[in-house]
Amino acid sequence: METEQAVEIRDAKRRIEATAADLSGSEFTDVNLAGASFTDVSLAGANFTDVNLAGATFSDVNLAAAKIENANLSRLRILNANLNGLRIVNADLRGASIAESLTDGMTIDGISVADLLAAHRAVNP
């Protein structure tokens, strides 16, 4: 049986649309994925470094144990995703939204998302 290898994307110039794909462990480095659409895609353990994901949409995706670093995530939309263990470091999150997603162990700049949500709920009951 042939095994699939992870995909590496560098310097992409076009809008990316991925559906029903296994991109686990992939490396996305210095790539413009603005407006990209990922639907029913596994990106578990993937690394996104120096990427532009502004306005991108992730729906029904697995980003467990992935890392996003030095990224533009403005207006990013995530819906119904597994974000357990996702690490986001040094990212622009203005206007980003996450809904109906698993976030156990997810961190933003080393701060637990669970702690951030608890603090938000304490201020905005």
Image (cartoon, helix red, strand yellow):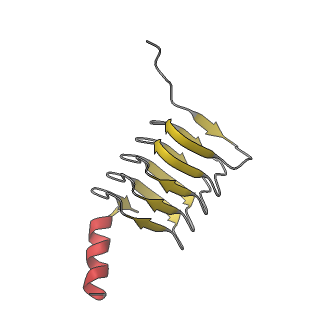
Number of numbered discs overlaid on the protein picture: 0
Q: Is residue 113 visible?
A: yes
| Image coords of residue 28 (percent x, y) | 57, 43
Q: Quadrant of the N terminus?
A: top left
Q: Is residue 106 left or right of residue 67?
A: left
Q: Residue furthest right?
A: 13
Q: Quadrant of the C terminus?
A: bottom left
In this rendering, is residue 94 above or below 23?
Answer: below
| Image coords of residue 78 (percent x, y) | 46, 60
> What residue sits 56% from the left and 32% below the top?
7
Choose top left, top right, bottom left or bottom right for residue 8: top right
| Front position in the image: 105 or 49 | 105
| Front position in the image: 52 or 34 | 34
| Front position in the image: 49 or 100 | 100
In this rendering, is residue 124 above or below 115?
Answer: below
Q: Is residue 116 left or right of residue 67?
A: left
Choose top left, top right, bottom left or bottom right for residue 117: bottom left
| Image coords of residue 36 (percent x, y) | 62, 53
| Front position in the image: 34 or 101 | 101
Q: Is residue 50 visible?
A: no
Q: Residue furthest top?
A: 1
Q: Is residue 46 left or right of residue 28?
A: left
| Image coords of residue 83 (percent x, y) | 37, 53
